[in-house]
Image (spheres, grey):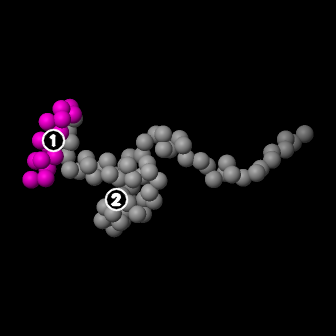
Amino acid sequence: MLQHACRKAARDAALGKAVSVHTRRHSFNTHLLEAGTDIRIIQVLLGHVPLNSTALYAKVATHVITGTASPLEGLNVRITPIA
């Protein structure tokens, strides 16, 4: 029944793409990751035992990946060229 309601709502909204309850699950995970939620917390929320299952759902937006600072950026390293 929930699946039927979800598909009807997508049709009524004229989204033009397939939508399912599982699509909502993917979106939920992605939005949590983009908000900075630890993947292990998402794992518990989704009810996954292996972390690999949660990682399959994780479709992180490009802007999140490019905005992630490297831990090396915080180092105060001076490079001295060899003469």
Mark seen at residue 53: 2
Q: Which residues are drawn in magenta?
A: 1-16
Q: Is residue 5 visible?
A: yes
Please identify the quarter of the rendering in which residue 47 is found. Answer: bottom left
Count neighbours of disc 1 (C-alpha within 10 A) and say few if under 14, some if 14 to 19, many if 20 or more.
few
Q: Is residue 78 magenta?
A: no
Please give the name of the residue rendered at 23% of the width and 50% of the height, measured from the top-left corner.
22
Please give the name of the residue rendered at 61% of the width and 49% of the height, measured from the top-left corner.
70
Mark seen at residue 9: 1
> Is 55 positioned to the left or the right of 14 in the image?
right
Count neighbours of disc 2 (C-alpha within 10 A) and say few if under 14, some if 14 to 19, many if 20 or more.
few
Amino acid type, callout 1: Ala
Residue 31 sits above or below residue 45 on the image = above
Image position, residue 53 (x, y; %): 34, 59
Q: Is residue 56 visible?
A: no
Residue furthest right as drawn: 83
Please give the name of the residue rendered at 18% of the width and 32% of the height, measured from the top-left corner.
14
Amino acid type, callout 2: Ser
